[in-house]
Structures are given as C-alpha cells and as structure tokens.
Amino acid sequence: MKVEQIPKVVEATDNQKEARIPLSFCREGDVCTILGFEQRVGRRFIQKLTSMGLVPGVEILVVRNNFPGPLIVEVKSTRIVLGHGMANRILVSSKR
Amino acid sequence: MVVVGLVGNPNVGKSVIFNNLTGAHQKVGNWPGVTVEKKEGECTHKGTKIKIVDLPGIYSLTANSIDELIARDFIIEEKPDVVVDIVDSTNLERNLYLVLQLLELGAKVVVALNMMDLAEYNGIKIDINELERRLGIRIIPTVATKKIGMKALCDAILEVARHDKEESKFAYPKDLENAFSEIAVTVKEAPELRKYNPRWLSIKLLEEDREIIEKIRKTKDAERIFKTVERVKEKLSSRYDDLIIAIADARYEFISKILKGVMVKPRKKELTLTDMLDEVFTHKYLGIPIFLVFMWTVFQFTFTVAAPFSDAIDLAFAISADFVRSTITPAWVASLIADGIISGLGFVLVFVPNIFFLFLALAILEDSGYMSRAAFIMDKLMYKLGLHGKSFIPMIMGFGCNVPAIMATRTIESEKDRLVTILVNPLMSCSARFPVYVLFGSIFFSYYVVPVIYSIYLLGIVLAILMALLFRRILATGKPSPFVMEMPPYLIPSAKSLVIHMWERGSMFLKKAGTFIVSGLLLIWVLSNIPWGADIGDTLIGALGHAIQPIFAPFGWDWRIAVALFFGFIAKEIVVGSLGILYNTGEDVTSLKAPIENAMTPLSAYALMAFVLIYTPCIATVGAIKQETGSWKWTVIAIAYELLLAYVIAFLIIAIGTFLGFG
C-alpha cells in the first residue's frame, strides 16, 4: 500500500510546479513556495519584502487567509501580515 | 570613550538591552530634522566609558523608511566604534540578513544573540563558537529580560573597539562580485564619495537604493557612474531577472550555508502558544468581537482602576487650596496661588491616573503583541477607507494622546497614506478631552453619562472615517499602498518595560501640564483679576469672553464657555481648569455643577462636548502635525478643517436637537 502511494505524491508535486497562483488564492494551512513577484509590485516593496525574508524560492505557510482581506504567513519562523493587494501580486506554487 | 550604535530587527528586545546597559543614564531627544526619538545612554565598563545610541528597529539597510535612513546614516556618517546588532535567536535566518548588511557596510559588528532561553525552550541548538568562526565576528548569547550576558556583551564591545576590523568573510557569487568591483572603480574616483565604502555603494546602486542614487546624482561624476551601472546591469540581465532579488537571494543563500550544522532546529514544530492564540484572535468572525471586548476592557480598566487615585488627588488639592486661602496674605497672593495655580492644576492632575492607566493598558496591548493582530483584523475595514491596517495602530493610540499617535504614523511607508492618517488622528478623542465630557456629562446626563460619553467617542470615529474618505478623494491617492508588517510572537510583557512605556508617554502629559497648561491657567487667572476685585464679567477676561461669545451664541454658550474654548486651543485640559477659575468655585470639580447647570441646556452641553471633541486638540498636536507632515500648508488645513467641522457639527446638533424637541 505504502509503496503504491509514493509515485502519486511525486506526480502531484510535478503538476504543481506548473501552477503559478497568486498567494491570495492559497488556503489556510497551505505550504507554498514563492516563485516571484508580479511586474506591478513596486521596487521599494520588493526591497521591503526581501528584507523580511520573502524571496523567491522560500517556503511559506499560510496561517490565515481572510479572503478578500489580509493574510498571515509564516516565513523563516516569523509571522508576517500581507495585505490582500500585496498577496495578489506574489506568485506561488502551492502544495497541501 | 567608545561609541556604540545599537541596531536590530523590530521585536528582538533591543530596548530591554538598552535599558539594561544604560540604566537610568539616558537622554531622550530627537534625531536632527526629524521627530524620530533618539535615545542615548552611557555606562562605564572596566574603566572605559561606553556611549550607547539606540537606533530604530529595522530589517535592512536599504533606506525605505525614515527609520532605516536614520539607522543607516548614523552608521555611515557618524561611524560608531562598534555596532551591536541584537539578534532574535529563535529566528536567526531572517535576523542575520541585517548582520550581513552591516558587515557589507564595513562596520565593526558585535552580535547579541538574544532570547536564548526561548530558543532553548523551542529546542533550537546553536553552536555559537562555530558561528563566530564562520562569520568572523563576536557573538554573545544573551537573555535581556533576565539581564544575562550583559557583562560579556560589554567585554566584547571593548575588545572589538580596540582591534582593527577583519575583512568580512561573506562574498557574493563571482559575477555579482565582478559587477560590484566594476562599479566600485568609477565610484572611487568621485572625491565626494571617498568617505564611503565603494563596494557597499556599488551594491546599493544595483539594489536601486533611492537615497544612494540621489547622493550620487549630486556628484560631478554622476553621469559616468550611472553609465557604468547601466552597462553592468545590462551585462547581468541575461542571468538575473531582478537584481534586487538576486542580491537578497545571495545573502539568504550565504546565511543558510553558514547555519548548516551550526543551528539545529527540531524537525516537527509543536503547536506554540502563538499558534493557538492567533487561531482565536485573528479569526475571521471572532476577531472583531474579541477586539471590541478588549477595547471595552481597556476603558473599563482605565476609568475604574484610576477612580480612587483621582479622588485622592482631588481631595489633596482641595485641602491645600483651602490651606493656602486661610493662611497666606495678602488676599490676592492667596487667590493667585489657591485659585490660579493649585485649583487649576488640580483640575488637570485629577486626570493623571486615568491617563497613566490608559497608557498602561495600551502598553500591555502593544508589548504583548496583540496590537499588530488588531491591525490585521481591522485591515479590511481600513482598506475601505483607503488606508490599511498599519494606520489603525496610531488611531487606537490617539485615544491616549494624539502626539505620540501622530508620531507613530512613521511606520507607514506611503507618504499620502501617512498624511491622511495624521490629518484624521485628532478626531480620535484623546484622554485630555475626557475631563470635559465627564464634567458636562455628569452634570446634564447624570444617569446616562456613560452612553453619552461613548456616543461622543463614536462620533469622533465616524467623523474620522468620513474625513479619511474625503482627504483620499482630495489627494486622489487611488488604492491604498501595499501592506506588509511583522507579527511578533505573543509575550507576557515585562513589568519594567510596561512601566517605562507608560512613563515615557504619561510624562509627556505631565510636562504639558507643567508648562502649557499652568501658564495658560495663570494667564486666565491674571486676566480674570484685572482690575482686581471687579466682578469677573467686568475684568479683561470678561471683555474677551463677551467679544467672542457672539460666535457661539447660536449654541447657547455663555461668555465663560467662550473663554474656556478660546484657551482650550492651547490644551483641552485648560477647558475644565479655566471654568473652575471663571466660575470662581475653587475646591473641586463637583462645585461647578450648580453654576453650569444654570448656564445651559443639556442639548447645548452635548453640542459643546462635540465641539470640544472636534476642534484642534492642543498646541502640542499642532506641533506634531507640523513636524510629521513637514508642511505648514497641511498644518493650517488640519486646524482649519477641525474648527470648521466642530462648528458645523455643533450647529447640526443644536438644529436637529431643537427640531426633535430636545431644546
């Protein structure tokens, strides 16, 4: 049984690599990997986000998502509030 | 003397370490040109004087906010002997990001690895010796709240101050390093930039740091430097989509490489207290009701706990005024001291317990970490006003005092958002206005005093919302700026830091009482006694009152109220205090009841409470608005709209009230 499940998991991960969704679409409890920022994100905010640990490649946990309100994410063991607008422009791949 | 700059991310216990090191030897001032508080302190360790400058809490040295700019400017311009970076040891990865930037800058860094007890509790193990070796800097484990590691920290400061700086062991990927060198060569040729580290300037140029770009624009070599930067960027564009991200990435990569084998974290994360509390406090539906319950508790706490203290102060002032009146001659000196100073000051100081307890309650909300949760749950509402959650914290603080509240807006990145938040902040009814509500509320609405006062606070909030919408329209800001904010883990606040917090803000009130308010009251006393012995209506103050009273005639306020409102512009505390002088009742607040009751109707009293709510809170707030907006235009607009709005609302209350038959 256990052996059979492994390929399924691998397959799922492969599929999700393709999916680029805005962070605001993630559900609470999702672990996401940041893929990048949309063009509309200002340069200063990219500086701000990166200094707080939100860089492409990093894994984040969605603690709260009060869609269409703000989110709480956990990154590098810190909790950060992100406004809905901001979360719309952070692209992630998500696995549950 | 050794000069030390104290830096660190927000919420790492920096101020606790500062207090531990400097004790009572602190000096609080402002950074030149801005209102951000500058704290300096001194201590002597092993015979050497150490001067410690507390820098604002920051995440990086890219100057995005005033805080970051101040911290950075201090380090690059004033070149402290040592920079102590306080690091949260439960969150090394993110905190080391700032350490690396300090090393890049060429500062001599000592790291205080704070909250070691919490790290241990969470099962995090850190090999400090190995970390020191890999970073090439001194790292001292500390537990600030228990004063552990303070001596070792001072030892390390002195040791590092004596030695020359070691070359940083942190290098970027080859292509980035080459790019830095290429820019550094041209930067070095500019004589104006000689005092800065050229490699650091190159990094900042590629990171598009506005401040540095401006600095270079002013040099003669600007064109050549920018050309080089463009050329280098062009070359790197094939490898990196975005250099800001690439540079940040390189730093984080270096950090994770350094931490490999040095830090061991438990694999499975246990459910922490923060997880559990956040589950409830930030809940989609429970969050707001819980917040309202907390706010209600804050006000209850403030007013019930403070009541006996207020009574005691009231009594003490009444007794001493009586004592002065019965012992001192001549009569006019006794009157000056008893009626002018003691009674006047008594009216104001009666509210000191309220104000201190309110600040204590707000400090508990802030230090425990709840305030940022409140910002989270109110974000959706604030968004509708065109602001975001961060604007909410200054609003709550406005209930205490608008001056620190307006200063607290500096965490808001967008200038326009900040301006709107500042302009509407005075509508949050500060504690100084509370005495006026209590006085008139208890005289005219005895049984309903609490709901009546509550309605005044609500009126302030509603007006703040409407004005925020209006100002956004005027400023044409469109959507609110992006919202990003750290949420610190929940902590049981330490009694010491609560007291310090409460004292820092509460003492501003005392200072105000001692200066503006006393001089205002003295002025009123003098004006109300010239000529001496005349009926108060025939004195100078009577003349002033009669001159401005017609403005307020539609509201049914007599000349005494007009005078009180006039001087209330200096500070709202004066309103109640001056009524005491004007009605010449002396002793205590209760003796004002009869004369005021005869002077107006409940409706005009309610209009008066609304007027006091809305018009300019005090001179100190005006000063704060001027300093924070940096513009006389907006300061004048703030005063003008408040006066106009106060008049219009008072008028509406009278008109609607009369129509409904309350007149």
Image (tube, coloured by chain):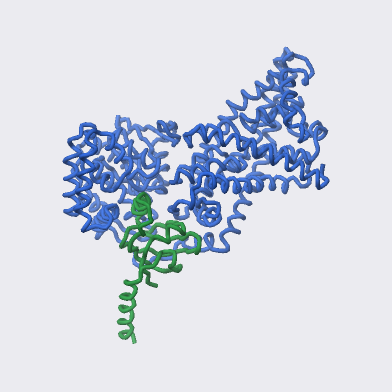
Chain colours: A green, B blue
Q: Tell me residue B164's x, y (percent).
A: 19, 37
Name the residue at 32% across, 30% down: B49
Q: Tell me residue B154's x, y (percent).
A: 31, 38
What is the residue that sits farthest to the top in this orientation? B330
Q: Tell me residue B409's x, y (percent).
A: 49, 43
Name the residue at 62% across, 42% down: B429
Q: How many marks?
A: 0
Q: Tell me residue B568's x, y (percent).
A: 65, 30
The quarter of the rendered structure image containing the C terminus of chain B is top right
Nearest to the observer: residue B247 or residue B432: B247
Res B654 quadrant in image: top right
In this orientation, does residue B116 appear?
no
In this orientation, does residue B234 appear?
yes
The quarter of the rendered structure image containing the N terminus of chain B is top left
Nearest to the observer: residue B3 or residue B544: B544
What is the residue that sits farthest to the bottom in this orientation? A1
Res B90 quadrant in image: bottom left
In the displayed structure, B252 sits above or below B626; it is: below
Name the residue at 50% across, 63% down: A68
Along the horizontal axis of the image, is B475 left or right of B640?
Answer: left
Along the horizontal axis of the image, is B97 left or right of B588?
Answer: left
